[in-house]
Amino acid sequence: MRSELSPDFSFADFRRASPIDADNVYELVLQRQSHRMTVRRSGTVIENLKRVVGATFRIANRSGFAAMSLRDLCKESGLSMGGLYGYISTKDDLAAMIEDVVRHASEAIPAWFEGLEDGQASLEATLRGHIYLSEILHPWFYFVFMDSRVLPARQKSVAKSAELHFQNRLAERALASGNYDAETTTLYASHALALAQDWYVKRWKYAKLGIGIDEFADSVIQILRAQSSRPLAPASDF
């Protein structure tokens, strides 16, 4: 990943290089969550996971995850109650599976760009990668942001810790670049992450303005640079 992308990579570049996409993410779920499942690995497991998770996203967007029952999920996914229990025992299991994907993917991003020698380039690539990955896995990121508040306290704590972990990695990259005030790097990292989250939480707003993901990512990077001691330059020229 690190060797394939230049610091100013586009969304198309990232999508070609990313080890995670909207289809193989279910292989990741199976790999990391098989301990929750009683079904044997077969050709139908991945397809049924897609049905269950896709149905969850549709119901959550329509009426909220908190209001969803397992019977609602069966009806939406087309699985029987017995079939559904082969993958999850409770709604909490399902939420944990979805949250785990976002947490795992987000925590992997900083390592993808550790090889960049320029500290500012590493910081910007990490933030840009987060934005682009949230586009590839938009329903997953949106669900975690919007519905983690209804999770059990332990799982809610895990979700918060994952966000703070990524924010801290951004702050470390900012500090290592030498372009930011050491006393305010965490605050800048928090602002940068909040801007990035706006893309997957309120993407409709940017669609209405005709702003695509590359333009959005460039604008976030430009705002980040405005807080650095490095002279400003167009984001696309970095």
Image: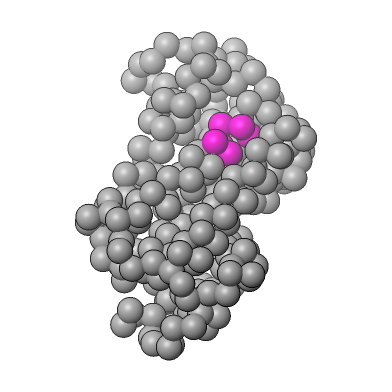
Point 44% across, 83% down: residue: 230
Point 59% across, 45% down: residue: 162
Task: Please tell me whether the stretch drawn in magenta is mainly helix, strand or loop.
Answer: helix
The magenta stretch spans residue 212: no
Q: Is residue 110 visible?
A: yes
**Who is closer to the viewer here, 173 or 161?**
173
Does residue 213 lie above or below 2 as drawn? below
**In the rendering, at what x and y percent does residue 131 appear?**
47, 61
Q: Residue furthest left?
A: 4
**In the rendering, at what x and y percent does residue 31 appear?**
41, 25
Q: Is residue 133 left or right of residue 90?
A: left
Numbered range of the magenta stretch: 95-100
Does residue 93 lie above or below 15 as drawn? above
The quadrant of the picture occupied by the C terminus is: bottom left
Point 26% across, 60% down: residue: 5
The magenta stretch spans residue 98: yes
**Who is closer to the viewer here, 39 or 14?**
14
- Residue 97, picture quadrant: top right
**In the rendering, at what x and y percent does residue 152 appear?**
76, 33
Q: Is residue 99 left or right of residue 231?
A: right
Point 35% across, 54% down: residue: 114
Say how the picture is coloured: one colour
- Residue 116, picture quadrant: bottom left
